């Protein structure tokens, strides 16, 4: 089920762009929302899907929530794809 959630989360271009943004470091929900021409509620849902798939983590600091990339799940996906290509794990 976890792989299915991850692939579903990665299927959406906005969610992929959010992940790309978080490569540079953590960002607040507001900073993320400011970069998209969609509602804050829509971005909140995208962040929720990414969090459910364990692709991002959140930390509350005062009234702000900060999001950061969880690279370990992405590494697992890459290893799985590598095995499909016939590559051996290191």
Image (tube, helix red, strand yellow):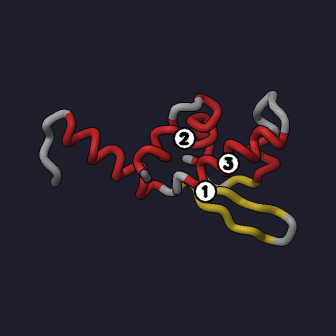
Q: Which mark is residue 9?
A: 2
Q: What whole-number distance in Å separates the C-alpha atoms at marks 2 and 3?
A: 10 Å
Going 21% across and 36% down the picture, which residue do you hit?
84
SS assignment at label 3: helix
Indicate whether 68 appears above or below 47.
below
Q: CA distance from mark 2 to mark 1?
A: 15 Å
Nearer the N terminus, badge 2 or badge 3? 2
Q: Which mark is residue 40?
A: none
- Picture coordinates of residue 76, whole percent (x, y): 34, 52
In this rendering, is residue 42 above or below 70?
above
Task: Say which residue label 1 marks.
Answer: 68
Report the residue at 40% width, 47% height from top: 3
Question: Which type of secondary structure does the marked residue at label 1 adopt?
Answer: strand
Q: Position of residue 37 (x, y in %)?
A: 81, 28
- What crowding class fits label 3: few (fewer than 14 Cα within 10 Å), some (14-19), or many (20 or more)? many
Foreground mark, 3 or 1, reads 3
- Camera-side residue: 12 or 20? 12
Dot placed on the residue nearer the N-terminal end, 3 or 1: 3
Q: Residue 22 location in percent, x, y?
A: 60, 47
Q: Are marks 3 and 1 in contact (CB under 8 Å)?
A: no
* Spot occupied by residue 74 in the image (x, y as percentages of width and height): 42, 49
Horizontal side of 87 relative to 44 (left or right) equals left
Query: Which circle's residue, 2 or 1, is located before the other in the chain?
Result: 2
Residue pictured at 81% horizontal, 31% vertical: 38
Mark 2: few, some, or many residues within 10 Å (few <14, many ≥20)? many
Q: Determine contact: label 2, label 1, CB under 8 Å.
A: no
Residue tagged by mark 3?
47
């Amino acid at each position: 089920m976890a792989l299915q959630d991850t692939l579903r989360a990665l299927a959406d271009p906005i969610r992929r762009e959010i992940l790309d943004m978080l490569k540079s470091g953590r960002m607040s929900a507001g900073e993320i929302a400011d970069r998209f021409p969609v509602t804050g509620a829509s971005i909140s849902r995208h962040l929720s899907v990414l969090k459910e798939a364990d692709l991002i983590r959140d930390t509350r600091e005062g009234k702000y929530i900060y999001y950061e990339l969880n690279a370990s799940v992405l590494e697992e996906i890459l290893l799985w794809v590598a095995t499909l290509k016939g590559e051996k794990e290191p």
